[in-house]
Image (spheres, rainbow, N blue to C red):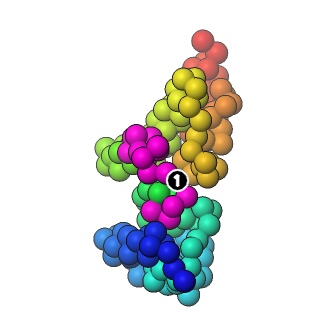
Amino acid sequence: MASLNVGSLGEYLREQRRSAQLSLRQLADAAGVSNPYLSQIERGLRKPSAEVLQQVAKALRISAETLYVRAGILDAERDRGEIETRAVILADPSLNERQKQVLLQIYESFRKENGFTAADGDDGASGEAAADDPRTVGGTDADPQQTAG
């Protein structure tokens, strides 16, 4: 019933959950999914949607793109550079969450400028919702003096 990718995904999620020192119930609550459903994902019995993977990644504080690759949603080879770049930014302990989101927005704007688009399935997992609005930085109102120049 379960594909190889889904089993690999489940094992990876279990490793990440344990390294974050979270119980299955704690992760399910943090991700907004049911405990039995998350258990089935970890055991490779269910293939979660990109949205569920995004919620789980956010709760684990890991890259959603990594989970997308493990689930077979993204092509690992084609998207490897972008995924690795995003993962490095998200894993940097010297940056706070706001700084990480702003840096990811800048990175994505440069990719768009150079003709690359966000990977399929990326529906704002990195906080790009306000990236096109020059008055916002990281989803908050920016200082008008900074954006006027």
| Residue appearing at x 55%, y 65% in the figure | 53
Q: Nearer the viewer, residue 112 or 128?
A: 112
Residue 131, horizontal then vertical, whole percent: 62, 34
Q: Nearer the viewer, residue 52 or 147?
A: 52
Q: Is residue 81 above or below residue 75?
A: above
In the displayed structure, does residue 122 sit left or right of residue 15?
Answer: right
| Residue appearing at x 58%, y 71% in the figure | 48
Residue 113, horizontal then vertical, whole percent: 57, 23
- Can residue 105 be seen by looking at this rendering? yes
Q: Is residue 35 above or below residue 101?
A: below
As for residue 81 lying within the magenta part, the answer is yes
In the displayed structure, does residue 80 sit left or right of residue 93?
Answer: right
Q: Which image quarter is the N terminus in?
A: bottom right
Q: Nearer the viewer, residue 71 or 16?
A: 71
Amino acid carrying mark 1 in the image: Leu
Q: Which residues are magenta?
A: 70-86
Please identify the residue farthest to the top as the structure is shown: 149
As for residue 19 lying within the magenta part, the answer is no
| Residue appearing at x 50%, y 75% in the figure | 3
Disc 1 crowd, CA 10 A, few/some/many (<14, 14-19, 20+): some
| Count of marks, rendered view | 1
- Can residue 38 be seen by looking at this rendering? no
Say what secondary structure mark 1 lies in.
loop
State the residue position of label 1. Answer: 74
Residue 2, horizontal then vertical, whole percent: 51, 79
Secondary structure mostly taken by the magenta-highlighted segment of the chain: helix
Please identify the residue farthest to the bottom as the structure is shown: 36
Q: Which image quarter is the C terminus in?
A: top right
| Residue appearing at x 62%, y 66% in the figure | 49
